[in-house]
Image (cartoon, helix red, strand yellow):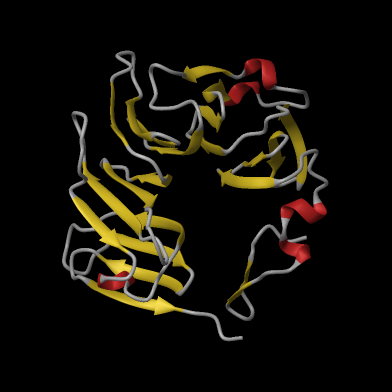
Amino acid sequence: MSNAWYDIGSLQWTDNNDDQWGFSTGLAAEGLVQIWTDNKYVYAATSSGLAIVDIELEQQISFATNREGYTTVWTDDEKILVGSSRGIKVMDKENVGPEEVFLYLQDYARTPDITSEDVRYIHGNENKLICCTAEGVDVFWRNSTGYRVYTELSGAKKCFATPNNYFYYTVSGTSVSGTPPWYICRLNDVTSNWNEPDVTYTTGSGFLVDAACLNDFYVTEHTSISGMNNTLFVATDAGVYVYDEGADRYAVYTTVS
């Protein structure tokens, strides 16, 4: 098995069983939901818990069993954070080892200190953590103050925090008839509760004119050709969009069947 899902020879992203952790490492977990990785481990949030895979050994070396499963996982240099239907839990990376680690997971955020304990997605940077829940979006200060700001809404799906505190999140809208719109929302840093984001991109318009559904996204900071703005990589039902926020230019990459 290869650790890289990118075939250097053909310059293609691969999609076969040999290059998928779940097929060749024997994860003691089912229902892969999300993965996160650092230079040592792959962390897999699944419907039965958290599996931690050693990249060099290509083997699962630790796990946290949870019959309700985990919906999301994110890590920094020192901490592992997971979300579920019971809020956010956290543990120190130093406790990763050849054993069950569920008991090391401690509460990080539960109601009333989060918009909902039904956590959909978490992401962060060195100073802050952003979280999408069933009832809103929360931004936590990762320090002793525990300061939190939030907005209440339904349909929040995924989120992203850049190193310099640009916060993005996606929202699935509602519609009486037809296809409901999706939104990418951006906060230019945030210091208090908010009702409206600073910037909104909507499916069916702008650079997302041909997209109806947003599957995933990633942001690189200060990579715009115009200077200090960011670049969005957005996976949609119409292909992958690469959007330069500063230049307001984009490219679309689609598959050919």
**Nearer-the-camera pick, 171 or 228:** 171
Regarding residue 126, the answer to whether it shows in the image is: no
User: At which x and y percent is residue 235?
Assistant: 46, 65
User: At which x and y percent is residue 180?
Assistant: 39, 60
User: At which x and y percent is residue 237?
Assistant: 49, 70
In terms of image quadrants, where is residue 57? top right
Residue farthest to the front, as pictured: 176
**Nearer-the-camera pick, 159 or 183:** 183
Determine the residue positioned at 77% across, 23% down.
99
Location of residue 172 with respect to 13 vertically, above or below: above
The mark tally for this picture is 0
Location of residue 196 with respect to 107 vertically, above or below: below
Residue farthest to the bottom, as pictured: 257
In terms of image quadrants, where is residue 205? bottom left
The reply, left or right, for residue 155 in relation to residue 3 is left
Determine the residue positioned at 20% across, 53% down.
199
Q: Quadrant of the N terminus?
A: bottom right
